[in-house]
Image (spheres, rainbow, N blue to C red):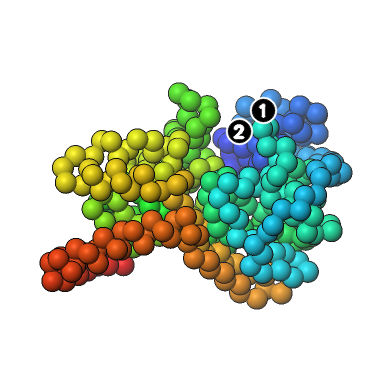
């Protein structure tokens, strides 16, 4: 263990090092399967340089989830992995309140033997998307592919680009937020930027600037729960349609943009967040892989409505207004 790792809680250190969830590590601690210098440590104990840590990880429990014939939009598939375009509304893996009807249930129907590294409830799952976020996910079919993809994700060698529509206007066309994320102390069901949270970094780039909102391109440098949504709220520009972090934001608008914002909110059917691009090296061959999917119809219709408004304005103003506004939005991109 290096000096830079000293002073970190043992459960957090092992979760990051072994690519296991904190919950999983804490369960192993409770079961006595983790020893520090030959003794059982407390969960909150801080690791120190030079300590010997032994971890016994039992094999995954047999899968008990039932395969379900749920349609999948498979963008790519081979013997090692598949890339899925997940629709909004589909939960990735079983959880309290969602015991079935998930992406995992669909995968079990489609794939004979998924990777067991993800555990009983998350077989093959390398990374997740929120229920109401659409877009690209990579799923590992075998343990070796799962391990290599997880390592690439941890080393930031998996590129994930999202499209997000946010309220208001960012102060700069390109921004980077590096702020730790953890449970919101005022509401444990939410995440927030908090002291002592897990490090998280996100990059934002303005693609289109509209009267009371902006369409962004978002790149993840880490993968924390609700990371994009929380970092945008931290900037003061939550995602349009976000039921947790952006509720009623349009009602705070004033001036000529208020009516436009109210209509935009009415037209956006769910949080406007879409995983559009996914790129990584193939875990078996090393071949560079890149996938891109367009906005799904429910979000594409919103963009069409905005663009129609620009075309109407352009016709009324002889082209000057819309062209000037678009040129401003594209500057520096």
Indicate the secondary structure of the residue bearing disc 2. loop
Q: Which residue is mark 1?
A: 43
Name the residue at 74% across, 31% down: 27
Q: Residues within 10 Å of mark 2 (few under 14, many from 20)?
A: some
Label count reads: 2
Q: Residues at badges 1 and 2 in contact (C-beta under 8 Å)?
A: yes
- Please provide percent x and percent y for residue 81: 72, 64
Name the residue at 33% across, 48% down: 264
Q: CA distance from mark 1 to mark 2?
A: 7 Å
Name the residue at 67% across, 40% down: 21
Q: Nearer the viewer, residue 299 or 177?
A: 299
Name the residue at 16% across, 71% down: 319
- Please provide percent x and percent y for residue 235: 33, 43
From what the image shows, is residue 243 above or below residue 240? Answer: above
- Please provide percent x and percent y for residue 38: 80, 32
- Specify the label residue 9 is tagged with: 2
Indicate the secondary structure of the residue bearing disc 1. loop
**Image position of 30 (left or right of 299):** right
Q: Nearer the viewer, residue 302 or 238?
A: 302
- Specify the label residue 81 is tagged with: none
Answer with mark 1 or mark 2, whichever residue precedes in sequence.
2
**Image position of 319 (left or right of 173):** left
- Please provide percent x and percent y for residue 168: 27, 47
């Amino acid at each position: 263990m290096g000096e830079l790792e000293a002073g970190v809680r043992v459960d957090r250190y092992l979760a990051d090092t072994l690519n296991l969830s904190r919950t999983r590590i804490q369960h192993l601690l409770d079961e006595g399967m983790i020893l520090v210098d030959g003794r059982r440590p407390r969960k909150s104990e801080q690791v120190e340089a030079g300590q010997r840590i032994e971890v016994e990880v039992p094999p995954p429990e047999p899968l008990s989830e039932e395969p379900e014939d749920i349609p999948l939009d498979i963008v790519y598939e081979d013997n090692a992995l598949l890339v899925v375009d997940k629709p909004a509304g589909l939960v990735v893996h079983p959880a309290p309140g969602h015991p079935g009807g998930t992406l995992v249930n669909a995968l079990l129907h489609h794939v004979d033997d998924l990777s067991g590294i993800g555990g009983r409830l998350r077989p093959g799952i390398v990374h997740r998307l929120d229920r109401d976020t659409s877009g690209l996910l990579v799923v590992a079919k075998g343990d070796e592919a799962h391990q290599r993809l997880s390592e690439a994700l941890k080393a930031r060698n998996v590129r994930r680009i999202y499209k997000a529509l946010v309220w208001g206007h960012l102060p700069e066309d390109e921004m980077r937020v590096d702020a730790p994320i953890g449970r919101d102390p005022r509401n444990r069901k939410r995440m927030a930027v908090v002291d002592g949270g897990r490090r998280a970094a996100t990059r934002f780039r303005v693609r289109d600037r509209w009267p009371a909102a902006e369409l962004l391109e978002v790149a993840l440098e880490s993968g924390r729960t609700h990371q994009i949504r929380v970092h945008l709220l931290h900037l003061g520009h939550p995602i349009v349609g976000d039921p947790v972090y952006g509720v009623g934001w349009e009602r705070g608008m004033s001036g000529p943009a208020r009516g436009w914002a109210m209509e935009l909110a009415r037209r956006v059917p769910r949080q406007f967040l879409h995983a559009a691009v996914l790129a990584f090296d193939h875990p078996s061959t090393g071949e560079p892989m890149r996938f891109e999917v367009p906005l799904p119809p429910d979000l594409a219709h919103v963009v069409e409505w905005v663009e129609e408004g620009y075309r109407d304005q352009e016709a009324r103003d002889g082209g000057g207004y819309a062209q000037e506004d678009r040129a401003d939005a594209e500057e520096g991109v």
